[in-house]
Image: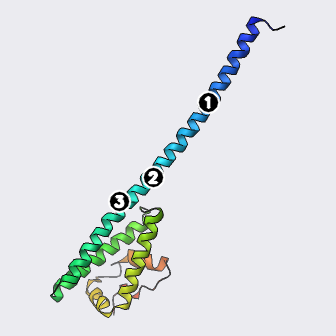
């Protein structure tokens, strides 16, 4: 027959084991919650960056289209291509995640396809190409996605 002393030590041992198990479960839940919050924060930051980048693109496109003089069109096109270069660099810095990354990729590929097919855009691009390093991020982005990038190479 168990004595009061053995019952107390048995109960304390079980209580300690139970507390350890509960603590472990609470710790796992807290870790999962923190991971979820981190993912949501990362996606929110990605979306905010994409919205800001989109606003900059929209503004430059509007200014480019509204420009009446050739010098103004050249200036705004150069600004637009610089924005595209920055977007490509940011893309490779893994700033964008999930759907934001997919949207940016498809937007950039579409714009570069339009630039490649437009004689006017290709002509406006040539004076902006200062050297072989100009728009290196754009060329890398296009190579990475299996697209030709000869429009972004200075003509001889």
Q: Is residue 151 visible?
A: no
Residue designated by label 3 = 48
Q: Secondary structure at mark 3?
A: helix
Spatial separation of the CA atoms under disc 1 and disc 3: 39 Å
Residue designated by label 2 = 40
Image quarter of the N terminus = top right
Q: Please name the residue shown 43% across and 54% down the image.
A: 42
How far across and down, in percent of the image, does residue 90 sit? 38, 66
Q: Residues within 10 Å of mark 3 (few under 14, many from 20)?
A: some
Viewed as shown, does residue 125 lie left or right of 138?
A: left
Q: Secondary structure at mark 2?
A: helix
N-term-proximal mark, 1 vs 2: 1
Q: Quadrant of residue 15?
A: top right
| Label 1 with label 2: CB-CB less than 8 Å | no
Spatial separation of the CA atoms under disc 1 and disc 2: 27 Å
Viewed as shown, does residue 61 lie left or right of 90?
A: left
């Amino acid at each position: 027959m168990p004595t009061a002393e053995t019952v107390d030590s048995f109960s304390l041992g079980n209580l300690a084991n139970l507390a350890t198990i509960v603590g472990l479960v609470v710790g796992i839940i807290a870790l999962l919650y923190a991971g979820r919050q981190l993912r949501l924060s990362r996606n929110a930051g990605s979306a905010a960056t994409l919205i800001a980048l989109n606003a900059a693109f929209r503004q430059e496109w509007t200014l480019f289209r509204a420009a009446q003089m050739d010098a103004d069109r050249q200036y705004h096109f150069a600004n637009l291509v610089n924005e595209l270069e920055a977007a490509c660099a940011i893309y490779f810095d893994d700033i964008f995640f999930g759907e934001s990354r997919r949207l940016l990729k498809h937007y950039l590929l579409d714009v570069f396809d339009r630039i490649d097919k437009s004689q006017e855009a290709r002509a406006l691009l040539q004076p902006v190409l200062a050297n072989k390093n100009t728009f290196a991020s754009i060329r890398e982005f296009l190579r990475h996605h299996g697209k030709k990038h000869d429009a972004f190479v200075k003509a001889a």
